[in-house]
Amino acid sequence: MRKKVTKAVFPVAGMGTRFLPATKSVPKEIMTLVDRPLIQYAIDEARAAGIKEFILVTSRGKGALEDFFDHAPTLEAELRKKGKDELLNIVKNTNMESGAIAYIRQHKALGLGHAVWCAKRLIGNEPFAVILPDDVIAAEKPCLQQMVEAFEETQGNIVAAMEVPEDKASAYGILDVKDDMGSMVSVKGMVEKPAKGEAPSNLAVIGRYILTPKVLQNLNKMKSGAGGEIQLTDAIAAEINEGRDVFGFRFNGTRFDCGSKAGFLQATVSFALSRPDLKDELSRYLHEVVALENAAE
Ligand code: UTP
């Protein structure tokens, strides 16, 4: 029987050191892209893909994430009283139904693989999605929805993949490609953060996965890998060694690395330019800035 993906894991337990000092007290995932926190883009993308259960793997100091998805009766009553219906709807769209969202703690930042492993009892024995909220993807059809549709066909592990320049490969997990079928590639190996010149291809894994529960069993056995962390990539690569399918999926869309400052700024400009209420003013300003820069050169 074909299995459906109804659960998604959001690993949000990392320390976000690249955004210090902001992340000393503000979780990275609460930081704002235009007017919505990163985590809301991730949750909305999951909802669009038909996900019904949302599992956040959190850590100390991430309480703001729980508050964000809770109902805010005082704020809602105030907006209702003032007739601010549009804002009221915006706020209400962030509320989660009781029981739909669960939080589990990763007590120590031992790596992404370990964070996913922490959710294993909540995932149970079914395929699940993993979304890293700091990878934000602008796409006509949301990336996870594209992947869920692909999974309905393949029923095998799928990782989102994107071409990267050779000099950037060592920042990613890189696919060793067996067959290239266009939007899908079958994978014969995966290398996390390869040393310079050792990347098996230019296809990098980015923060969207659909995984079968066997990956959780692999995580049971995982020791720390690249960077001393328990790597999700290694647990997925173990699937291949055990004869199960892993596919790379070339999604349609533009991915922004909001885990880095430059990526976050680019996403901010791009998302703001796609908003009718901000586009004209921002675009005028950007032209002015560029003209001034050019004149100063
Ligand atoms: P990153 O590598 O971006 O780490 O993690 P980070 O801590 O968030 O940020 P920097 O590098 O210190 O600036 C990728 C994703 O994996 C999660 C993070 O929350 C992020 O969503 N993660 C990472 C965990 O949940 N637990 C970990 O132990 C490590």
Image (cartoon, rainbow, N blue to C red):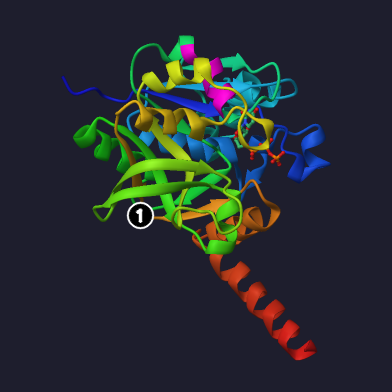
Q: Residue furthest left?
A: 1
Residue 152: which quarter of the image? top left
Please provide percent x and percent y for residue 176.
40, 48
Main SS of residues in magenta: helix
Q: Which residue is mark 1?
A: 252
Residue 105: which quarter of the image? top right
Q: Tell me if residue 187 is in the magenta stretch.
A: no
Residue nearest the observer in this picture, 256 or 76: 256
Q: Residue at x 42, y 38 (%)?
A: 45
Drawn side of residue 65 relative to residue 198, left or right: right
Dot 1 surroundings within 10 Å: few (below 14), some, or many (20 or more)? some
Q: Is residue 89 visible?
A: no
Secondary structure at badge 1 equals loop
- Which quadrant: the N terminus? top left
Q: Is residue 82 above or below residue 57?
A: below
Q: Quadrant of ligand 1?
A: top right
The amino acid marked with disc number 1 is: Asn
- Which quadrant: the C terminus? bottom right
Q: Is residue 276 above or below residue 247?
A: below
Range of residues picked out in magenta: 113-120
Please provide percent x and percent y for residue 64.
69, 26
Q: Residue at x 37, y 19 (%)?
A: 214
Residue nearest the observer in this picture, 273 or 28: 28
Q: Residue at x 71, y 20 (%)?
A: 108
Q: Residue at x 32, y 25 (%)?
A: 5
Residue nearest the observer in this picture, 134 or 272: 134
